[in-house]
Image (cartoon, coloured by chain):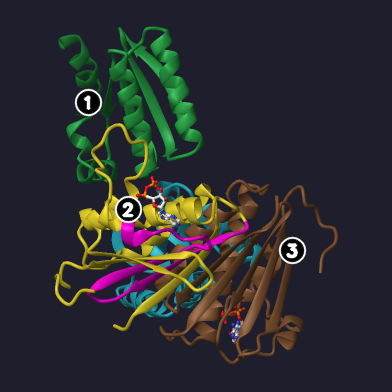
Chain colours: A cyan, B green, C brown, D yellow
Amino acid sequence: MKYKVREDGNVTIIDLSGKLMGGYDADVFRDLVHELIEKGRKKIVVNLAGIKWINSTGVGILITGYTTLRKNKGDLKLLNVSKKIESILYVTKLNLIFECFDDEHEATGSYTRG
Amino acid sequence: MKYKVREDGNVTIIDLSGKLMGGYDADVFRDLVHELIEKGRKKIVVNLAGIKWINSTGVGILITGYTTLRKNKGDLKLLNVSKKIESILYVTKLNLIFECFDDEHEATGSYTRG
Amino acid sequence: MAEETFVLEFPSSYKWLNMIDLMCTEITAGMDFGRNALNEISISVIEACTNALEHGNKCCPDRSVMVVFRRLEDRIVIEVTDCGEGFDFADYLQHIPDPSDIHKKRGRGIFIMKAMMDTLKYEKVEKGGMKVILKKMTDRGGEEGDE
Amino acid sequence: MAEETFVLEFPSSYKWLNMIDLMCTEITAGMDFGRNALNEISISVIEACTNALEHGNKCCPDRSVMVVFRRLEDRIVIEVTDCGEGFDFADYLQHIPDPSDIHKKRGRGIFIMKAMMDTLKYEKVEKGGMKVILKKMTDRGGEEGDE
Ligand SMILES: Nc1ncnc2c1ncn2[C@@H]1O[C@H](COP(=O)(O)OP(=O)(O)O)[C@@H](O)[C@H]1O
Ligand SMILES: Nc1ncnc2c1ncn2[C@@H]1O[C@H](COP(=O)(O)OP(=O)(O)O)[C@@H](O)[C@H]1O
């Protein structure tokens, strides 16, 4: 997994790319989320467009990020969820947890509207 | 292997796609060349842009087409030769036989100039 | 058409999972599966291989994971074998934790395989490791004659 | 890093050659090979597998081809084994026909492998078939200590 962090107003966009799975990726993503929370940037959109693939552990990484942010009065929303990721979210019912968007403006806009 | 036949003036362009290798493909390509010769269309450009890959037998198919056309006072030139195909042609010295082009207009133009 | 069998052995590292994915895609191409079903097979194979290399082989690079694909007219059967200690699958399969529990980091792999494939079975192999057997019927194959 | 070994068995049909190509690309990725060398390896593996399934296994779908990839720091070694009758490779290797002969439809595979890899060796396996062993040193590995 690789990532880039961008800002759009008070929303932070994390562009993930490569493979999202257990082990090392989990630590990297957890540290990133903590760092952003410390900076007061708690409105996160995770852009999955560059994710080649993901497994259940990768979804676990996202859900851990989500719970951490929610505890800190922030949120984590998903952008560009592929069919594969969607079906993992669907069978695990995590689709009911994550807000998902296909359009970046809609994703960031959902925070300012909210 | 799949193919489409197009005409540009008196030059015939064969767009090949998929995999070019022995067996069935050899028969299909031989029949196609014979058919074109019978129609009097002997100036051929084989466009390899859509070829996912090729092996030495595939190159053999092209060289057989070439010799058949030359015997009938025609020619067979190659368009969009990938790096992989190029290196097969290179080690077998068949690059000295085939005229290769990266640009379709140049390939067809080479016949009208000649 | 008779059964077509493919065997792959690879070292226990995450970095080869993409290769398994590509292989799975090539093998299942042209079978009577819809796009969703193909995704489900590929996701399940990755989950099975992840468990094998991680829980089974403890990511030890000189232990390999073996994957067998059996491609039949009406179904695909995939067996993934590791050389680990095994686990109490009978017990686990009876008490699979709720995958929608957001406080759990892990523990969704077996649930996903079970939900996405028609059959999920575990066996202990002689040498000690686990073999997980996944099966999915094609659209034509229907649901009949399982187990 | 120690040797990483991959084993693949697949049915004798041309349609699986693309899968071998993908696998070869994944395995050699990240090794110290330039783009040309990677192409040469992939072309050679395809030639070896084509010969194995065609001349060795006579395209019989229930005979399989076995490919072993050994990925080392300084080289890749690839062994392709079939279950055919074998052939007189010693004689053939001494009289490889001219590959630039435009009147020949076929007969360029072995020449290509020999030209593109650092070592090409043939062995007869016990059960009767042929094993061809291909080796290529990485850019760092250099040319030394061969055979
Ligand atoms: N091949 C295996 N060898 C040993 N233990 C396994 C194996 N597969 C699964 N397990 C056990 O079953 C548990 C649940 O697996 P799973 O549902 O895939 O979730 P996760 O892998 O995220 O823990 C694992 O934590 C592990 O204890
Ligand atoms: N695995 C094999 N088993 C039996 N014969 C083989 C094998 N590989 C090569 N040969 C023999 O060597 C010949 C030359 O092979 P090659 O140079 O690859 O050209 P081609 O396959 O186009 O004939 C083949 O025609 C075949 O007779």
Residue at position x 25%, y 76% in the image: D73
Judged from the image, the secondary structure of the residue bearing numbered disc 1 is loop
Judged from the image, the secondary structure of the residue bearing numbered disc 3 is loop
Front in this rendered view, residue B76 or C89: B76
* Label 2, label 1: how far apart the Cα atoms are: 32 Å
Front in this rendered view, residue D143 or A26: D143
Left or right: D58 with respect to B8? right
Q: Amino acid at mark 3?
A: Asp
Q: Chain of mark 3?
A: C
Judged from the image, the secondary structure of the residue bearing numbered disc 2 is helix
Q: Which mark is residue D110?
A: 2
Q: Amino acid at mark 1?
A: Asp
Residue D43 visible? The answer is yes
Vertical order, C83 against D53 (above or below): below
How packed mark 2 is, by other alpha carbons closer than 10 Å (few <14, some 14-19, many 20 or more), is many
Please give the residue where the numbered disc 3 appears in the rendered image. Answer: C118
Residue at position x 72%, y 75% in the image: C121
Q: Is mark 1 within 8 Å of ligand 2?
A: no
Q: Amino acid at mark 2?
A: Ile
Residue at position x 48%, y 58% in the image: C22
Left or right: C83 with respect to A17? right
| Residues tagged 2 and 1 counted as in contact (Cβ below 8 A) | no
Highlighted magenta segment, given as a residue range? D62-91
Residue B72, picture quadrant: top left
Please give the residue where the numbered disc 1 appears in the rendered image. Answer: B103
Q: Is residue D67 magenta?
A: yes
| Residues tagged 1 and 3 counted as in contact (Cβ below 8 A) | no
The spot of residue A25 in percent (x, y) is 39, 75
How packed mark 1 is, by other alpha carbons closer than 10 Å (few <14, some 14-19, many 20 or more), is few
